[in-house]
Amino acid sequence: MAQKGSKDFDIEVLKQKIASGRDHTLTVVSDSMIPLIAVGESITVGPIENVATLKVFDIVLFFQGARLNVHYLTRIDHEQGQYITRSLKNPHEQDYPLKRSDILGVITNKKLSIWHKIKILLLS
């Protein structure tokens, strides 16, 4: 994931921009969400106003290890503050659990279609 027009960026600055309520544009550099989001495509990240509004199949931007990722939510446990995501490229592999603080924002210009959701549920 790269900030539009820049190869390097500060994750703390990105967090602040998203948290301030402004949408932010990033360019996708991996194929983990193909066919929904292609390499080189721009995505718009918005803030999460209320964590309780997150739901399964929402596409989120999160920081894990030393990299940014964009995957969809598969499990949500608000009480434990634990969130599980998955990529479209590897729909049978769960990602590691995330904490709320790992999730930077929600993708506002891309949504899983009903077809994607049914396909995911049938393959699970």
Image (spheres, rainbow, N blue to C red):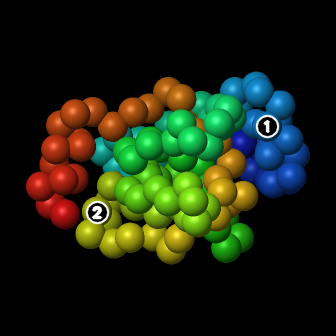
Instruction: Looking at the picture, tell me which residue is in the foreground, 45 or 58.
Output: 58
- Note whether 45 is above or below 12 in the view shown: above
Q: Quadrant of residue 23?
A: top right
- Note whether 23 is above or below 40 in the view shown: above
Tell me, yes or no, if residue 34 can be seen here.
yes
Q: Amino acid at mark 2?
A: Pro
At 53% from the left and 70% from the top, the residue drawn is 97
Whichever of labels 1 and 2 marks the residue nearer the N terminus, that label is 1
Q: Is residue 32 left or right of residue 2?
A: left
Give the crowd class for mark 1: few <14, some 14-19, many >=20 residues within 10 Å.
some
Instruction: Report x, y in % for residue 113.
Output: 27, 33
Q: Secondary structure at mark 1?
A: helix
Q: Quadrant of the C terminus?
A: bottom left
Q: Amino acid at mark 1?
A: Ala
Spatial CA distance of label 1 from label 2 is 29 Å
Instruction: Report x, y in % for residue 117.
Output: 24, 43
The furthest residue to the left: 122
Q: Is residue 43 left or right of residue 14?
A: left
Tell me, yes or no, if residue 27 can be seen here.
no
The furthest residue to the front: 79
Labelled disc at residue 19? 1
Q: Secondary structure at mark 2?
A: loop
At 28% from the left and 63% from the top, the residue drawn is 91
Instruction: Looking at the picture, tell me which residue is in the foreground, 78 or 121.
Output: 78
Q: Is residue 118 left or right of residue 47?
A: left
Labelled disc at residue 91? 2
